[in-house]
Image (cartoon, grey):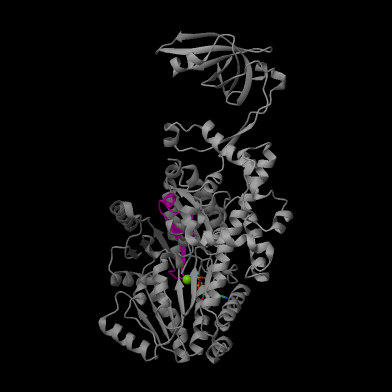
Amino acid sequence: MIRAELGVSTIYDLLLLTPSRYVDKRTLSPISAVKLENSLVQIAGTLSNIRLIPQSKGFRLSAELTDESGQLELVWFKGHQYIQKQLKENQRVRVFGKVNRFQDRFSIVHPEISPLGDQPLTSYSGDIEPIYALPEKLQKAGISQRLYRGILQSIVKAKDFWLTETLPTYLIEEHRFASKTEALRRIHCPENLEQTQSALDRLKFEELFYMQLGLLMKKQHRKQAVKGRKFDTVGDLFLQYYQKALPFELTEAQKRVMREIRNDMGSGLQMNRLLQGDVGSGKTMIALLSCLIAIGNQSQSCLVAPTEILAQQHFEDLSKQLTPLGLTVRLLTGSSTKKERNSIHEMLLDGSLHLLIGTHAVFEDQVVFANLGLAIIDEQHRFGVAQRSRLWRKSQLPPHILVMTATPIPRTLAMSVYGDLDISVIDELPPGRTPIITSHRNDGARLKVFAFLKEQIALGRQVYVVYPLIKESEALDYKDLMDGYESISREFPSPQYAISILHGQMSAEAKNYEMRQFEKGVTQIMVATTVIEVGVNVPNSTVMVIESAERFGLAQLHQLRGRVGRGAHQSYCILMTKAQLSEEAMVRMSSMVKHSSGFELSEIDLRLRGPGDIMGTQQSGSLQLKFADLIDDSVLLSTVRKRVQQLLEEDPEFKNPAHQCLIKPLKMMLKGKILWSYIS
Ligand code: ADP
Ligand code: MG
């Protein structure tokens, strides 16, 4: 029963189910001191006047409890018969419970009662009692807090209770931790709350320590086991482009990331790097330069994007720059014709195709490279792990992998979920960007917003109006979009204005056409659903209006905002919502108005939603921490990670006797007892 309900299989597991809180029953209060409603108190005295009192419905059982200082009523609304049998007039009892106040009288409803016998009150000394979160089923089966606590306490109080130490002695000394045995004793049998807290701190440290150890060992192992292509030089292509054709100077952050990638590619080990950079931070240039290194080292590259529009844009952007260097670039998407596909397959095999850009179509089995040296995946969170690993199998030596994401993941999450990847961060925007001005308006301000759009269009700018599209209510959303389109058409009549519309139910061809009209400036207004969320680049557009903004998450709002502010002109993001918002939605809106950095927003998002929600179920295994909390313990996590890195550098094979104690728990963990999940 215990086993099934608590999901534990050994006594050790049971010991690790720590109390959800503690109640302090060490001292007795005089009844006269009971004054605070809802506080938990422990008092003692003599019972009198035990009787049933009629009420509007049925009876209540009542008893007076008296000590030298005063008197208070004890009340039961249920279980009268059973309780009444246990209460005796003039009996001395100890009482614990929550203080209730009715008019000017204090009482305790359904108190916990223990007989006191003849024990003098002055000599009373009680305990701090752990309270466990017991599943209802166990409670119904008669396993009460008292019984459960009793079982655990008898285990940890046993003379021969001893657990193998799981942390190296020097760490225990450094942090002044209790031993494992002592820590668990203090948790289930607390003497004082400070000690119990420090015991919990130890378990927290240990949990993060093993999580990082697992991740970093996996990373180390992969580096040793998986050989990678060694690109000895950056190559002439790279140099030629970098020195003669680079359209702008790289930011310091871009230069740093390029050095990191260059080092990886030259190391002889496979690169497995996650590149995080805010919208507009210039990730495409990193992709291009990395491809040049790969191609310059006689291998092919591919770049995979999550949508056709984005793949198309990358294709245009990159082929414009690479074709003058004599390189061949092709586009492969779901709407490529059979003829195109065939010619792409051929060119991939004979090696004449240098860079293939595409959507998930690139993952298909028929797509085979002669020599794939680098695979870049843009907007990582849209692709699953399984899809990504299919790229690996496309060549004998696995290609270097660069995953790029514009949805920054909070540092603590990155360290716990992607802890076995190398991470590069572009934390700097190209110079000369004017920050986007974000405002929050409700429907009452609609006319003013329209007037503002007209002003911007008169200045020659273009605007987006975006509607939510959420799978569950697709039909409704679609109606919202069409209603919106109509009202905008009325407000912005042709021929003075031209409007494009873009949504998921259109054919790829129609989407492309509308996108093109907007890009060329033929249309000034783009009414769209979130299909444009990722990557669309029209530098002349300066206003992003987000309708029903309260229905979008922070990451999505930030992505959408990133569609403007791409050119030289001051840009604006207007969040339209209804007037009455939930508190959480208010925080989202005000955070958007206040913060422009995706990294800051991702931290706020983590606080609002919690780690499991952000990463989805796929990675939630590694986020189910028992003791630590990725938000509250982020500083500890960084410290622990550094410590583990140092340990693995100094003693990768645990030869140091102090590290012997790590081997067994690690084996248990890696055997799948604790499931950390990994990417690729
Ligand atoms: P993202 O990281 O969102 O993919 P892009 O690669 O699309 O960003 O870059 C956004 C814009 O910034 C592009 O127009 C690009 O040409 C420009 N850009 C990138 N790096 C620099 C730089 N170092 N200096 C000036 N402009 C840059
Ligand atoms: Mg991009």
Residue 427, percent from left and from top: 59, 67
Query: For this view, does 139 lie left or right of residue 345?
Result: right
Residue at (50%, 42%) from the top-left corner?
583
Visible residue check, residue 679: yes
Residue 144, percent from left and from top: 49, 31
- Of residues 567 and 678, which is closer to you in this image? 678
Query: For this view, does 236 lie left or right of residue 492?
Result: right
Q: Does the magenta stretch include residue 346?
A: no
Residue range highlighted in magenta:
535-558
Residue 78, percent from left and from top: 44, 19
Give the quadrant of residue 242: bottom right
- Count of picture labels: 0
Residue 459, percent from left and from top: 47, 66
Q: Which residue lies furthest to the left in this view?
A: 338
Visible residue check, residue 211: no
Q: Does the magenta stretch include residue 553?
A: yes
415 to 441, vertically: above or below: below
Residue at (55%, 92%) from the top-left corner?
236
- Of residues 286 and 430, which is closer to you in this image? 286
The N terminus lies in which quarter of the figure? top left
- Of residues 447 and 125, which is closer to you in this image? 125
